[in-house]
């Protein structure tokens, strides 16, 4: 009806300025920023492809976006989202889903619809992230963590008890194996039973990632928890390259090299040297020595030695005052050593029973002390990469801290723990939603780095989350209220962040 280049004439009305008011202040900045990140990754387009609309009232692709956005902005339960958070934000306008259409059952059904498309999502995000940020996937970092449950989880066979990284051995858990690039960008993950040993997950995750993305010329990096003879043979049999932390006991084979002085200094307090494997010509060990780590281990040895001394003295004093069976004292000595295992090897304890009394005595093995002093601060890396320098291999291995940082963000900022769901599929969906939220987090991180804004995406997100929308109500002379949903004007700091990130904040949104 109008020429596209012709702006309509403005319409002027008389406003009752005494009664202008604002209503319905809603959170806008966080959800809007999350949606911009989703658009950048074209994740909404993928969801529309893998989850095409059917007879449902609200497309499942949009419900999946609700879950991801809420997990990033305000991690909470589906019930809290439905009853409180969703309607307090501008997400209804941003996604076009009225607040009354969001309830807990619909969110739970969205979880069910999400899980079957995990593989497609991982592949899309890996390719898109690689394109947008020019990422290289030549070095893959793998680590495992756990997340615990509240509840019995009787219907979930994956929920098992085992060593808890969360210090919640009273709860069942599942383990999560995550693969990330050297900059911490996630490629994919797998969920394992809560009692599955880390070392047993290695071959499974390597095989799956190769099935997804091919072998190419990748180097796999894992900590010493992944080290086993079977895993090393598996890597060699497929001509795969690896850098893996070696067990502490392997250091004994390199006692001579520890005593030699031909170390290469990487930085103050850190030295490395290459050592040929005594068992395999195709393997090389990187011997590393850290001054900070030495001071830490030295203090630990001293602390545990002192604890054992005090505990044994107390036990000996007790034996002098009353009679104990030898078996009782043996058990107590074993308990003392188990609680202070760092220095247990230093002590040689002898428990005797004679004339109805039990006595205890001990000596200290000075050869153990000498070896402990020699290897304090030292650790080994094992690799079959032959054309790298020692410092390059060390720098590659130390990137494992990126995988550890991923777990910290999942557990602190995205609240992956504890898991309240009891059904297996909902547990898997909960972890998938957390993974998607982390991808958005990491996308903002990469954008911030490229814009010279540092390594604090949380501070950027928190600052932009302060931007809100309000309904501005303008009463007119004709007794008709003009209502406009307006976005708050950003502060100078917020405007700078938006400009550096290349984002344009809208002035109004449709209510």
Image (cartoon, rainbow, N blue to C red):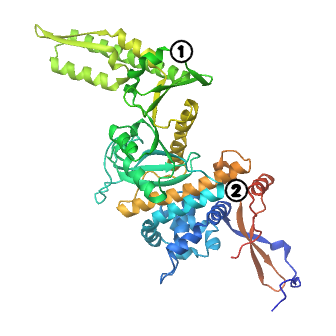
Q: Is residue 2 visible?
A: yes
Judging by the rendered image, the residue that carries numbered circle 2 is 464
Name the residue: 57% across, 73% down: 99
Quarter holding residue 164: top left
| Earlier-in-chain disc, 1 versus 2 | 1
What is the x, y in percent for residue 60?
50, 74
Please rate how many residues cluster around mark 1, counting C-alpha atoms within 10 Å: few if below 14, some from 14 to 19, many from 20: few
Label 2: few (<14), some (14–19) or many (≥20) C-alpha neighbours in 10 Å: many
**Percent position of residue 61, x then y:** 53, 72
Residue 399 lies, with reference to residue 117, above or below; the image says above
Q: Residue furthest left?
A: 355
Tell me the tag on residue 261: 1
Residue 149 seen in this snapshot: no
- Looking at the picture, does residue 166 appear above or below residue 297? below
Q: Indicate the quadrant containing the N terminus: top left, top right, bottom left or bottom right.
A: bottom right
> From the image, which quarter does the C terminus lie in?
bottom right
Tally the marks.
Answer: 2
Relative vertical location of residue 358 with respect to residue 279 in this rendering, above or below? above
Q: Which mark is residue 286?
A: none
As helix, strand or loop, the secondary structure at mark 2 comes to: helix
């Amino acid at each position: 009806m109008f020429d596209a280049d012709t702006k309509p004439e403005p319409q002027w009305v008389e406003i009752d300025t005494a009664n202008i008011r604002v209503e319905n202040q809603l959170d806008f900045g966080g959800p809007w920023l999350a949606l911009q990140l989703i658009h950048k990754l074209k994740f909404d387009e993928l969801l529309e492809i893998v989850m095409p609309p059917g007879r449902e009232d609200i497309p499942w692709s949009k419900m999946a976006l609700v879950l991801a956005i809420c997990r990033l902005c305000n991690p909470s339960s589906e019930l809290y989202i439905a009853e409180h958070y969703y309607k307090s934000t501008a997400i209804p306008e941003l996604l076009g889903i009225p607040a009354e259409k969001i309830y807990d059952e619909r969110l739970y059904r969205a979880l069910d619809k999400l899980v079957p498309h995990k593989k497609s999502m991982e592949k899309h995000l890996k390719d898109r992230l690689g394109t947008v940020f020019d990422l290289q996937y030549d070095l893959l970092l793998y680590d495992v963590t756990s997340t615990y449950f509240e509840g019995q989880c009787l219907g979930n066979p994956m929920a098992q008890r085992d060593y808890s990284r969360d210090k919640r051995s009273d709860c069942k858990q599942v383990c999560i194996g995550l693969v990330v690039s050297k900059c911490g960008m996630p490629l994919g993950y797998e969920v394992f039973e809560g009692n599955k040993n880390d070392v047993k997950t290695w071959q499974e995750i390597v095989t799956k990632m190769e099935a997804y993305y091919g072998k190419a010329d990748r180097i796999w990096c894992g900590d010493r928890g992944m080290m086993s003879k079977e895993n090393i043979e598996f890597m060699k049999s497929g001509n795969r390259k690896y850098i893996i932390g070696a067990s502490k006991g392997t250091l004994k084979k390199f006692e001579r090299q520890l005593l030699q002085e031909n170390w290469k200094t990487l930085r103050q307090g850190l030295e490395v040297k290459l050592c040929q494997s005594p068992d395999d010509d195709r393997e090389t060990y990187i011997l590393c020595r850290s001054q900070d780590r030495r001071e830490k281990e030295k203090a630990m040895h001293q602390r545990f030695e002192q604890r054992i001394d005090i505990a044994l003295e107390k036990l000996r004093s007790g034996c002098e005052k009353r009679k104990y069976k030898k078996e009782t004292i043996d058990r107590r000595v074993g308990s003392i050593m188990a609680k202070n295992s760092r220095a247990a090897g230093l002590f040689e304890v002898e428990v005797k029973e004679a004339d109805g009394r039990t006595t205890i005595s001990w000596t200290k093995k000075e050869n153990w002390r000498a070896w402990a002093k020699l290897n304090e601060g030292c650790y080994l890396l094992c690799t079959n990469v032959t054309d790298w320098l020692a410092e390059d291999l060390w720098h590659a291995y130390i990137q494992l801290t990126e995988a550890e940082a991923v777990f910290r963000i999942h557990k602190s900022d995205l609240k992956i723990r504890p898991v309240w769901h009891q059904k297996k599929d909902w547990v898997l969906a909960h972890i998938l939603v957390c993974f998607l939220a982390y991808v958005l987090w990491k996308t903002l991180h990469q954008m911030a780095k490229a814009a010279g804004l540092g390594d604090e995406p949380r501070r950027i997100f928190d600052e932009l989350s302060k931007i809100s929308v309000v309904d501005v109500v303008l009463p007119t002379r004709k007794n008709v209220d003009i209502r406009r949903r307006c976005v708050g004007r950003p502060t100078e700091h917020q405007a700078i962040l938006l400009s550096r990130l290349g984002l344009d904040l809208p002035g109004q949104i449709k209510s």
